[in-house]
Amino acid sequence: MTDFVNSLFSLKNKNAIITGGTRGIGASIAEGLAGAGAHVILLQRDLSNTTTADRIKKAGGQATIIECDLGVNSQVNNVVPKVLKIVDHIDILINCGGIQRRFPAEDFPEQDWDDVLQINLKSVFLLIRNVGKHMLTSDRKGRGNGKIISIASLVSFQGGLTVPAYTAAKHGITGITKSFANEWSSKGINVNAIAPGYIATDMTDALMKDENRSRQIMERIPAQRWGKPSDFMGPVIFLSSPASDYVCGDCMLVDGGWMGR
Ligand SMILES: NC(=O)c1ccc[n+]([C@@H]2O[C@H](COP(=O)([O-])OP(=O)(O)OC[C@H]3O[C@@H](n4cnc5c(N)ncnc54)[C@H](OP(=O)(O)O)[C@@H]3O)[C@@H](O)[C@H]2O)c1
């Protein structure tokens, strides 16, 4: 890389924490961050899953796994002190962990509503609040802006079908992204979101196997393909790097053109 490109996009000496890094979109994002030079700290409920950390280390990067079940608020609230036992600063937070539950709206179970709102919104609020407070109160001289990125969805803008809880949570993600950005953009913290379109992962397996839905979805995607987890490496590196210092409270679409139709 030229010095010019490095000065815009390098994540060397940055410490990045990420949820949802065990598989799917989060695994690719974690590998992308490490490839750009960051030490990646994976927040996982399953400590025995070392796949992503192993891949990063094999490629010459730095990765550490820390236990955190996004369904347990005491564990979520303990993340910052735990991470600060390993590194002095947290420079980047990526909220990518998430779950999906599908039922017809009239039968949507209350427990599933609570589970989805806990994992997809409350834990994200707690992590942004706590990591942001660390970024605001630690000495960041010479470290550049703090960067916080949460994974939203097309149903941050649309209603979807059979996914009312997921839709509420993802509308909430774009909402709190703007709320935190309004308070912190002048204080050296960029808070943004990324809205994926239809991406081939475990989460969308049922949709891909439903021939009718799958065909309808493809017909609306101008790029004429489902997205891949690796499509998120570039956008996340951009939003994590000095190249995006004036991007605040935004939700970037990475959807093959879906929202333009
Ligand atoms: N795929 C899509 O088309 C699409 C579209 C729009 C938005 N998104 C969003 O993108 C993000 C990643 O989605 P994906 O498709 O990559 O999903 P995925 O393949 O199903 O992966 C979900 C990730 O979340 C983690 N997770 C779930 N519950 C957790 C918990 N209680 N504690 C800790 N980690 C937990 C999983 O960890 P385990 O391995 O331990 O289960 C896994 O790493 C999600 O926020 C999702 O809503 C996806």
Image (cartoon, rainbow, N blue to C red):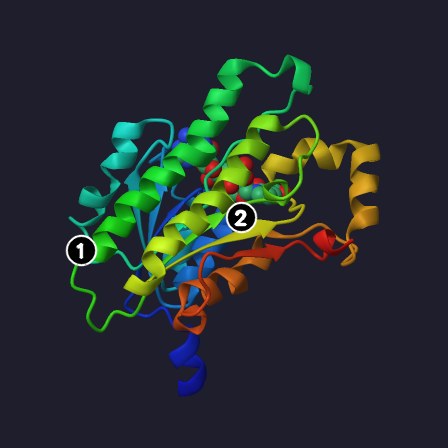
Q: Secondary structure at mark 1?
A: helix
Which quadrant holds residue 127? top left
Q: Residue 239, relative to residue 76: is it above or below?
A: below
Query: Looking at the rendering, in which quadrant would you find the N terminus?
Result: bottom left
Which one is earlier in the sequence, the residue at label 2 or at label 1? 2
Question: How far from the left and from the top, in percent, is residue 243?
Answer: 44, 73
Question: How far from the left and from the top, in percent, is residue 206?
Answer: 69, 31
At label 2, which amino acid type do we have? Ile
Mark 1 Cβ inside 8 Å of ligand 1: no
* Left or right for 49, reference 73: right
Tag 2–tag 1 contact (CB < 8 Å): no
* Residue 242 seen in render: yes
Which quadrant holds residue 39? bottom left
Marking on residue 196: none
Q: Secondary structure at mark 2?
A: helix
Residue at left offset 45%, top offset 81%: 5
Mark 2 Cβ inside 8 Å of ligand 1: yes
Question: Disc 2 to disc 1, how far (Cα)?
Answer: 31 Å
User: Around disc 2, counting alpha carbons within 10 Å, would you say few (fewer than 14), some (14 to 19), or many (20 or more)?
Assistant: many
**Foreground residue among 94 and 170:** 170
Q: Residue 191, relative to residue 157: is it above or below?
A: below
Where does label 2 land, which residue? 25
* Left or right for 169, reference 35: right
**Foreground residue among 50 and 80:** 80
Question: How far from the left and from the top, in percent, is residue 137?
Answer: 17, 55
* Residue 1 seen in render: no
Residue at left offset 51%, top offset 34%: 169
User: Around disc 1, counting alpha carbons within 10 Å, would you say few (fewer than 14), some (14 to 19), or many (20 or more)?
Assistant: few
Question: How far from the left and from the top, in percent, is residue 120?
Answer: 47, 35
Where does label 1 land, which residue? 137
